[in-house]
Image (cartoon, grey):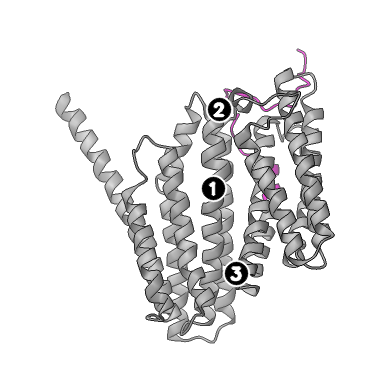
Amino acid sequence: MSISRSLLRGRGSLDSGKVGMVELFFDLVFVFAVTQLSHSLLAHLSILGAVQVALLMVAVWWVWIFTSWITNWLDPEKLPIRLGLFGLMIAGLLLSSSIPKAFTERGLMFASAFVFMQVGRTLFAIWAVRGESLSMTRNFQRILAWLMCSGVFWIVGAFLDGQQRLLCWALALLIELISPSLYFWVPGLGRSSLSDWNVEGNHMAERCALFVIIALGESLLVTGATFAELTLSATGVMAFLVAVLGSIGMWWVYFDSGAERAHHRIAHSSDPGRQARIAYTYLHVLIVAGVIVSAVADELVLVHPDHASDAGILVIVGGPWLFLLGNALFKWVMSDRPLPPLSHLAGLVLLMLALPLALNHWFSALVLGALTTAIVVLVALWESLALRQASASITSEKAAGE
């Protein structure tokens, strides 16, 4: 028997979409990155600080999701791919460690690590698919052209200061964010097609679900570590319970039915590339952002349960709002519904109604945290009961028809 030299992931078998242990090992770097992001936001609770952390968070997500696309095509169980992931892990640790000072003295480290991961991974992919179809090589060549263009702005921005660095990096990130929507069109090379992005749906859905788990794990870690440092009191215990119930509610909203239904849909889709691009590449960043911001809110409520600044109030309300918005859009795109889930829309409206009252300091930080947690739990219960009632109704109709 001849041994295949292809480095591509197998397709069509039961194990073809399985997430490998080396991918989970790679994700540990991003556990650290998520921790760094939440701590950076907590340390810089201002409009400028929020914008900077938002840019860094999207950049971290972007480098992770692009790597997930690569390991969707290439088999991480093959030795060259595994070694490539280890190289990316080293760069990822440098990237993550530089996050708190990315806009000060470690800007060049952050930019260099990011560009190395984006450009280096794509060059590696071009080498890995040699001998495969020309369309796959062309696809990576187009991606490389866009990433080299954005890389110039990342590196140049590292030598600038303050607002100039922020604007330069924002332009670099914008170039990367719009490139998939333009199908990586390059003069002379044309543009990619959705058939070039034929992904293994099982793998993509599971990878993104695991990143949500990483973010939720960070939320629980922050809650536990902060509570352990507090003097034991009834208020502290209440804040602890509010934070934990909030994380449980978020888990329920995402994993009870939405993630599984979307997983089934993309796994059986005739056009998985389109769904992977919209639902997983773009919309999941809102879900992850919501969890990270909520983790910061949990720490604020635990440490200062009696009062929150206006910035703190925006964080306490904004975290669940971003999370529900991301889930609403994700479930809408991955279903045949004419509108996003009514439960999610109601939750978004309730949070918006609570915001002006909170900014007028009608609530303490603890009460506001309890209110936002109650809204997330309400959305989870509403959707869960509605889906179970719909399922029971369909079962009854089938039984009656028989």
Q: Secondary structure at mark 1?
A: helix
Q: Residue furthest top?
A: 1
What's under tag 1, amino acid-wise? His
Placement of the C terminus among the 4 image quadrants = top left
Residue on which disc 1 sits: 284
Binning the other alpha carbons within 10 Å of mark 1 as few (below 14), some (14 to 19) or many (20 upward) gives: many
> Quick one: 14 or 316, which is closer to the camera?
316
- Tell me if residue 28 can be seen: no
- Label 2 secondary element: loop
Q: In the image, what residue type sits under mark 3? A: Ile
Mark earlier in primary sequence (1, 3): 3
Q: Are marks 2 and 1 in contact (CB under 8 Å)?
A: no
Identify which residue, 124 or 209, lies in the foreground.
Answer: 124
| Mark closest to the chain's N terminus, 2 or 1 | 2
Q: Which residues are magenta?
A: 1-28
Q: Give the x, y percent position of residue 72.
A: 64, 33
Secondary structure category for the residue under label 3: helix
Q: Which residue is mark 2?
A: 14
Magenta span has 379?
no
Question: Could you tell me the amino acid type at mark 2?
Answer: Leu
Residue at 41% x, 60% y: name it: 249
Q: Position of residue 56 (x, y in %)?
A: 68, 58
- Crowding around mark 3 (Cα neighbors within 10 Å: few <14, some 14 to 19, many 20+) is few
How much space separates mark 2 and mark 3, taking CA atoms? 48 Å
Near mark 2 (Cα within 10 A), the count class, few <14, some 14-19 or many ≥20, is few
Residues 11 and 40: in front is: 40
Q: Which of pointers 2 and 3 lies earlier in the amino acid sequence?
A: 2
On screen, residue 183 above or below 344: above
Disc 3 target residue: 47
Residue beneath the point at 82% across and 67% down: 105
